[in-house]
Image: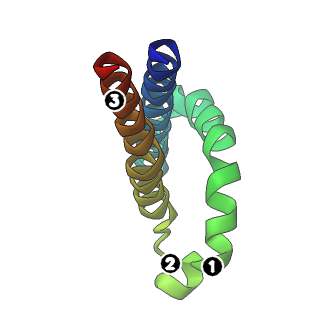
Amino acid sequence: MILFANLLGAFADIIHVVLRIYMWLVIFRAILSWVRIPALYLVAVILYHLTEPVMRPLRRFVPPSKMGGIDITPILVIILIWFVDRLIVVTLADYAHQLREHALSL
C-alpha cells in the first residue's frame, strides 16, 4: 500500500512539473510573439509547434477577430493548466497522502 501511495505521489509530482514547464513554454511563446528577434526565430518556431496543438482548438471558441485582434488563448491555456494542476495533481497527491496515513495506521 505504501509503495502504491509513493507511486501516486511521484506521478503527481511528474505531472505537476510537466504542466509547469508547458505553462512556461506558453508564456515564452506569447512574449516572442510580441517582439521579433531574428536570433530567436528557431526558438519561436519550436515553441509554436509545441504549443499550437493546445491553442488551436481554443481559438475556435475565442477567435482573435472577436476580441479586437487580441489573442487571449495563451491566457486561457495558462488558466486551463492551473485548473488541471489543481484538479488532478492536488487530488492525486492528497489521495497518496491518505493512503500513506492509512497504511501506517494499520
In front here: 67 or 5? 5
Q: What residue is shown with label 2? A: 69
Find numbered disc 3 in the image and state the secondary structure of the residue it sits on.
Answer: helix
Label 2 CA crowd tier, 10 Å (few <14, some 14–19, many 20+)? few
Q: Quadrant of the C terminus?
A: top left
Residue closest to the far top: 3
Which of label 2 and label 3 is nearer to you? 3
Q: How many marks?
A: 3
Picture residue at 38% right of the left edge, 20% below the top:
103
At label 1, the amino acid type is Phe
Which of label 2 and label 1 is nearer to you? 1
Q: Mark 3 or mark 2, which is nearer the start of the sequence?
A: 2
* Image quadrant where residue 96 sits: top left
Find numbered disc 2 in the image and state the secondary structure of the residue it sits on.
Answer: loop
Residue 87 lies, in percent from the top left, at 43, 52
* Image quadrant where residue 98 sits: top left
